[in-house]
């Protein structure tokens, strides 16, 4: 149970670091106040009203300009650069002892074959195959 909780917490921490450092841009195209198209990976497609505005002879549509694009940018965190140049002596001792103790968990133990020479086999009082009259041919 403890290992399962440990794995779940580890995956949650991975997602927290991943999503806190990720940045992205959303491009949106509006016609008036209505959202027509949005895109994350490329620019949003136009609704076609821009072509009508330039070819129209009405001055009121040209002045208003009902279509517009909007970009929303979400910046991730860029402060995760850890410098390993200036460790204190106590930190170096801690890292060396931690790595040493962690690696010692995975050392294989020597497997000794048990020696039965110290223990003699039990004495046979009766021959069991003769009692059941079964003979191996």
Image (cartoon, grey):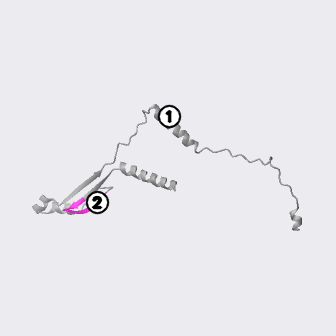
Residue 14, x across and y down, in percent = 43, 51
Q: Quadrant of the C terminus?
A: bottom right
| Residue at disc 1, secondary structure | helix
When the figure is inspected, residue 12 is found, relative to residue 86, above or below; the finding is: below
Disc 1 versus disc 2: nearer the observer: 1
User: Is residue 101 on the magenta stretch?
Assistant: no
| Residue at disc 2, secondary structure | strand
Task: Say which residue label 1 marks.
Answer: 93
Which is more N-terminal, label 2 or label 1?
A: 2
When the figure is inspected, residue 65 is found, relative to residue 114, above or below; the finding is: below
- Report the front residue among 109 and 41: 109
Look at 40% across and 39% down and name the residue there. Answer: 82
Residue that protrudes farthest toward the bottom in the picture? 133
The magenta span reads 29-39
For label 1, count other residues whose C-alpha is less than 10 Å away and answer few (under 14), some (14-19) or many (20+): few
Task: Say which residue label 2 marks.
Answer: 38
- Report the front residue among 21 and 93: 93
User: Is residue 33 on the magenta stretch?
Assistant: yes
Residue 112, x across and y down, in percent = 71, 46
Residue 75, x across and y down, in percent = 31, 48
- Report the front residue among 13 and 79: 13
Query: Quadrant of the rendered structure where residue 70 is?
Result: bottom left
Look at 34% across and 46% down and name the residue there. Answer: 77
When the figure is inspected, residue 87 is found, relative to residue 134, above or below; the finding is: above
Look at 44% across and 32% down and name the residue there. Answer: 88
Query: Quadrant of the rendered structure where residue 66 is?
Result: bottom left
Say if residue 47 shows up in the picture.
no
Left or right, 71 with respect to 112, comes to: left
């Amino acid at each position: 149970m403890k290992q399962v909780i440990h794995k779940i917490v580890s995956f949650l921490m991975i997602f927290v670091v991943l999503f806190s450092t990720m940045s992205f841009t959303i491009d949106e195209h509006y016609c008036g106040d209505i959202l027509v198209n949005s895109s994350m990976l490329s620019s949003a497609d136009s609704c076609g009203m821009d072509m009508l505005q330039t070819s129209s002879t009405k001055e009121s549509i040209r002045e208003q300009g009902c279509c517009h694009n909007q970009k929303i940018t979400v910046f991730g965190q860029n402060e995760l650069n850890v410098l390993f140049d200036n460790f204190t002596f106590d930190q170096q001792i801690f890292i060396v002892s931690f790595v040493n103790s962690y690696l010692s968990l995975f050392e294989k133990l020597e497997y000794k074959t048990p020696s039965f020479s110290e223990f003699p086999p039990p004495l046979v009082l009766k021959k069991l195959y003769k009692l059941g009259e079964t003979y191996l041919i």
